[in-house]
């Protein structure tokens, strides 16, 4: 009984999930999510860190008290100097000199920075040299962004070349579309939830591309294996063979994603959450979100899109029509054959009404055209009175 469970059938690639046949549903859902993500990015934007928006940071030793105590004293110093701003973010960081609190504020002038630093030292009862202050211009963030975009363009170009050489151009287009979908959805989640964007976020953002590409290549490799020489038989359409590949590689992709998410989850929830290592939060968060989205896009977007593109290939179109024609003949009992997919097992794609209208006894690829058999002693079966042993007429 347990052997027939969903987990067992998934592991053996026998779950029979109709992923490719329901591509219209996945494309509709992906389209709605992409629209929401793009609207959020365009209208709401991102919560930028001081590296991108510009600002100041003050580091005070953790010995002054809790993080809330430090934030309260820095806000008091900012108010005393009439700066009109407050602490934007506060986190605990580690260093060679021990733990400290990093408190970031919007942009201050040089005189304001010096005055606030002296006021913080006075309020906390420590020396001013124990407080370190840094000022970051937004021009540095713009430079990081331009280099990240350049790296993204180069990466996608190299991916296209590799996939065209390794597979074909349709697989390259489907894979890149899946990568772009992954990036936009991850960016949309950051915009909607309000996660802060830092240089660590950009690094993690580019890192998830490699993981997403690996997941797509695993599935496409199985698709290529299942569809190699597919036009030589009339048992499966291209979409059905691709759907079988998704089912066969689904458990492998799931295991890979879970194993990859476990250390990233530990980095995020234990390192940043429990241990308070705030510098790990930005990197761990984008990796966790991006890897989870990459698994879904590689299964629900890449392979269905590949099947859609292949169906525009005249050779695949002709093959699909032959399969449907043979299936229609089998359903009517006109022919019999082994290994044919029954109408009940056919996917939504295989039941296309236009293709089904062409149902008939289509010849198998490579078969000789049917014709009359020659009769006589050379080519046909000898007649009843032919020369054969024991064939003499009895008297």
Image (cartoon, rainbow, N blue to C red):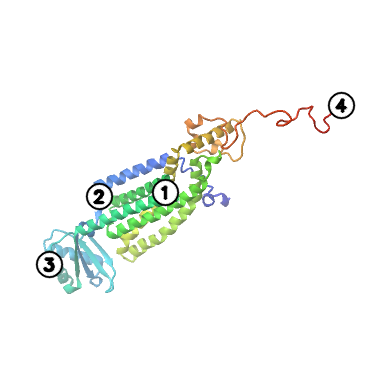
Q: CA distance from mark 1 to mark 4?
A: 76 Å
Q: Tell me which residue sits at (75%, 30%) in the image.
A: 382
Q: SS for tag 2?
A: loop
Tell me the element at label 1.
helix
Q: Residue furthest right?
A: 395
Q: Quadrant of residue 132?
A: bottom left
C-alpha gap between disc 3 and disc 4? 132 Å
- Which of the pair 164/217 is nearer the observer? 164
Please tell me which of labels 1 and 2 falls first in the chain.
2
Asked whether 392 or 191 is in front, the reply is 392
The residue at which mark 1 appears reads as: 164
Report which residue position mark 4 lands on: 394
Q: CA distance from mark 2 to mark 4?
A: 103 Å
Q: Earlier in the sequence, mark 2 or mark 3?
A: 2
Q: Nearer the viewer, mark 3 or mark 1?
A: 1
Residue 125 visible in rendering: no
Q: Is residue 28 visible?
A: yes
**Viewer-closest of 221 and 53:** 221
Gap in angstroms between the C-alphas marked 3 and 1 = 60 Å
| Residue labelled with disc 3 | 115
Counting residues from the N terminus, which is met first, the one under dot 3 or under dot 4? 3
326 or 25, nearer to the observer: 326
Closer mark to the observer between disc 1 and disc 2: 1
Instruction: Name the mark on residue 45.
Output: 2
Instruction: Please identify the quarter of the rendering in which residue 30 is found.
Output: top left
Residue at the image point whose x is 20% and y is 73% from the top: 130
Q: Is disc 4 surrounded by few (<14), some (14 to 19) or many (20+) residues within 10 Å?
A: few
Q: Is residue 370 above or below residue 340?
A: above
Earlier in the chain: of badge 2 and badge 4, it is 2
Q: In the displayed structure, would residue 23 be above or below residue 119? A: above
The Cα atoms of the two marked residues, 1 and 2, are separated by 35 Å
């Amino acid at each position: 009984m347990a052997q027939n469970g969903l987990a067992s059938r998934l592991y053996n690639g026998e779950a029979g999930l109709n992923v490719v046949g329901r591509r219209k549903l996945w494309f509709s859902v992906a389209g709605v999510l992409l629209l929401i993500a793009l609207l959020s990015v365009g209208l709401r934007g991102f919560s930028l860190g001081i590296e991108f928006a510009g600002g100041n940071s003050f580091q005070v030793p953790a010995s002054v008290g809790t993080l809330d105590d430090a934030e309260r004293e820095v806000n008091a110093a900012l108010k005393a100097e009439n700066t009109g701003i407050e602490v934007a973010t506060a986190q605990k960081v580690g260093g060679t000199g021990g733990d400290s609190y990093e408190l970031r504020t919007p942009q201050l002038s040089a005189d304001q920075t010096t005055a606030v630093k002296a006021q913080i030292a006075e309020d906390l009862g420590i020396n001013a040299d124990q407080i370190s202050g840094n000022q970051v211009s937004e021009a540095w963030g713009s430079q990081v962004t331009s280099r990240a975009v350049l790296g993204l363009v180069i990466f996608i170009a190299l991916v296209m070349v590799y996939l065209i050489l390794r597979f074909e151009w349709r697989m390259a287009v489907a894979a890149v579309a899946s990568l772009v979908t992954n990036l936009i959805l991850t960016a949309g989640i950051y915009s909607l939830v309000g996660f802060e964007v830092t240089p660590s976020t950009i690094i993690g953002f580019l890192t998830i591309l490699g993981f997403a590409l690996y997941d797509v290549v695993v599935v496409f490799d199985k698709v290529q294996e299942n569809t190699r020489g597919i036009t030589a038989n009339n048992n499966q359409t291209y979409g059905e063979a691709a759907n079988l590949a998704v089912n066969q590689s689904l458990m492998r992709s799931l295991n890979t994603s879970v194993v990859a998410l476990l250390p990233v989850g530990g980095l995020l929830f234990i390192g940043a959450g429990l241990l308070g290592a705030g510098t790990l939060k930005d990197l761990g968060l984008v990796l966790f979100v991006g890897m989870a989205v990459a698994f879904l896009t590689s299964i629900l977007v890449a392979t269905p899109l590949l099947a859609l593109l292949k169906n525009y290939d005249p050779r695949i179109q002709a093959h699909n029509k032959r399969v449907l024609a043979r299936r229609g003949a089998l359903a009517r009992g006109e022919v019999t054959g082994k290994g044919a997919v029954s109408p009940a097992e056919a996917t939504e794609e295989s039941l296309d009404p236009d293709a089904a209208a062409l149902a008939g006894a289509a010849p198998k690829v490579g078969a000789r055209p049917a014709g009359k058999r020659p009769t006589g002693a050379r080519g046909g079966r000898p007649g009843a009175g032919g020369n054969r042993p024991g064939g003499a007429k009895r008297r």
